[in-house]
Amino acid sequence: MIFAPPKNTGLTLGLAALLGLSGLGGLLIIFVRTASPSLLTFIAFVLIIVISAALIAVVYGVFGLARARYILSRNALVVDWGWRREVIPMGRLGEVQLGAAIDPALTLRPRGLNWPGQVTGLAPWREGDEVEVLATTPALSGLVLIEYPGGAGGLALSPADPAAFVQTLNDLRAAGVEDAVEPESRRAGLGDWPIWRDRPMAILVALCGLSVVALVGYITLIYPQLPAQLALHFDAQGQPNRFGPPAGLFLLPIIAGLVWLVNTLGGLWLHHRQTERIGAYLLFGATALIQGLLWAATIGLLTAGR
């Protein structure tokens, strides 16, 4: 039997957020492309990055909510939420309680990006424990709490009819298991990848990304002081052989950004495959080296072009 959480509020607000963020990001992109480089355009550039990250997070949340469902059978409880999937054999389920019977006034506060109608993440629970919330409300009055020793300590679910969900689950448990199933816990989200537990590499990736932003900021802030024409290329003897407007300098942070993006995605994929981590480290190290070379090239061009 399939129970779905109430989705209308979360999907409506999520799609509205996507439209709003996309519109704002589009306006900022137009502004950056048409305005002269300045502190204001650099701030707009940073906001575009922040909005892009927020868009990815909201898309991930909307996708998860759109696929959310709780499946009950005599053999197992299956929870689907986007790429998240939890298969819990009936024999492994602990106590199942209606949140309204525990404390209808209590609200869980899971960590992560959430909005009304889309509430996911780990939330503090009793005596220092945590419960994983895969629901559309943080209020216990709309939740079902399920103890599950193999998980985070418990699950908090929000079927549209919590009482019917609990009654059905109890009836199925009383009927007994038909076929044994293996437990499954699939966490395909990027936030669960092991790179975030490899602190030195995670810091290196972040610093390389900040280096790209800093390079854009450096060129943008010095731009008003630059002459109308700069040396943008040198021959083998070190003599300038191509001149152009200073806007050509922005090609360097574009290259830096593309290198960071491609190498980071490739490095994350390799790092996720435990046997390929040496390749990931080589990609991350190459990114840092290229960032340094591009910084040196930028400073060299500015020095030669004054």
Image (spheres, grey):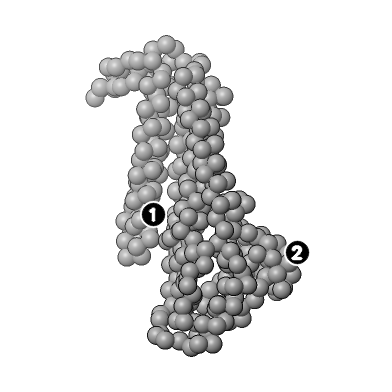
Q: Quadrant of residue 232?
A: top left
Residue 301 image offset from top left, x and y in percent: 38, 23
Residue 180 image offset from top left, x and y in percent: 40, 85
Whether residue 149 is situated above or below residue 100 in the rendered picture: below
Whether residue 143 is situated above or below residue 234 in the rendered picture: below
Tell me how far mark 1 sits from mark 2, CA to CA. 42 Å
- On residue 165, which mark appears? none
Mark 2 lies on residue: 105
Three-letter residue code for mark 1: Leu
Mark 1 lies on residue: 268
In the picture, measured across the screen, residue 33 lies left or right of residue 118, that is left
- Sequence-wise, the earlier of marks 1 and 2 is 2
Residue 205 visible from this viewpoint: yes
Looking at the picture, tell me which residue is in the foreground, 111 or 271. Answer: 111
Of tags 1 and 2, which is closer to the observer?
2
Q: Quadrant of residue 131?
A: bottom right
